[in-house]
Amino acid sequence: MSETSGTLVRPTQLFPLTRHLSYCLTPLLARTALTPNQITAMSMAAGLGGAWCFTKGLWWWSVAGGLLLVLCYTLDNCDGEIARLKKMSSEWGAHFDDLVDWAVDSAFFAALGYGTWAATGNVIWFWLGLAATFGATADYVVDLVFHARARRDPERETREEETAAERRPETWIDWLIYTFHKLSRADFCIIVLALALFDIAWLLLPAAAVGAQVYWLIDLYKHMRGRPP
C-alpha cells in the first residue's frame, strides 16, 4: 500500500500470505461504503466466531474455526489498506485494531484449551490455554504502557523505530525469533488452519503457553532497551 499515492501495491514477497489475500479482497471492499473501523469490527466478529468454533473440540468445527481466523486476519490487513486508500486513518482506529488483535488471540487460546479439555477430559489443556491467554494479555498491556509513555515523549517512538531498524538478525537465535515473530503474527491463522486440518491444533497449546511468556518478556526487554538514558 502506498500512503502517498493512495493506490494498492501488489505484494512482492511470499510472506505474509494473508497480504496476498487482502490484496484481492481490499479492492472489493473499497467499492463499498464500509469504513476501516467497520472492517475491523468485521475482523473481530470473524475472529471471535472462529475462537468459539474451537470450544467444540471437534475436527469439523476446528476447520471452520481455522477458516474464520484466516478471514479475520485477512480483514485485519484490509482495514489498514482501506484506511490509506480512503485517507481515513486515525489514532483511535489504530487502538481499536490493537484491541481486536488482543481479543481474538486471547479468545482463541482460551477456546482451544477448553475444546481440547472437552475432547480429552484432561484439564491441563485448559490451563495451558489460560497461560497462553495470560501471555497475550501481558504483551498487550506492555504495548499500552509504552505507547502511553511514547505519547508523553513524541521523540521516543521515533528513537525506538530507528533502533529496531538498525538491529538485524545475526545469530541463529536472532533468526529463530525473527522468523517466529513474522509467522506467528501475520500468518498465525494459516498455521492454525493447517494444524486443524490434521486435527492437531492442540500442539499450539504447550508451545503458546511457554512462547507467549517469552514473547511478552522479549517485548518488554526491547521497550526497556529503547528507553533514553
Image (spheres, grey):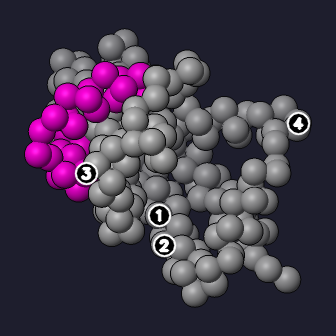
| Quarter of image, res 151 | bottom right
Nearer to us in this view, 13 or 128: 13
Q: Residue at x 40, y 35 (%)?
A: 7
Earlier-in-chain disc, 1 versus 4 = 1
Find the distance from the CA under tag 4 to the CA under tag 3.
Answer: 39 Å
Q: Mark 2 points at which residue?
A: 144
Query: Mark number for residue 36?
Result: 3
Q: Mark 4 points at which residue?
A: 171
Q: Which amino acid does label 4 sit on?
A: Thr
Instruction: Please rate how many residues cluster around mark 3, counting C-alpha atoms within 10 Å: few if below 14, some from 14 to 19, many from 20.
Output: many
* Residue ranking furthest to the front: 5
Circles 1, 2 touching at the beta carbon (< 8 Å): yes
**Percent x, y of residue 173:** 81, 37
Examine the structure image and report whether residue 135 is included in the region drawn in magenta: no
Find the distance from the CA under tag 1 to the CA under tag 4.
Answer: 27 Å
Examine the structure image and report whether residue 38 is included in the region drawn in magenta: yes
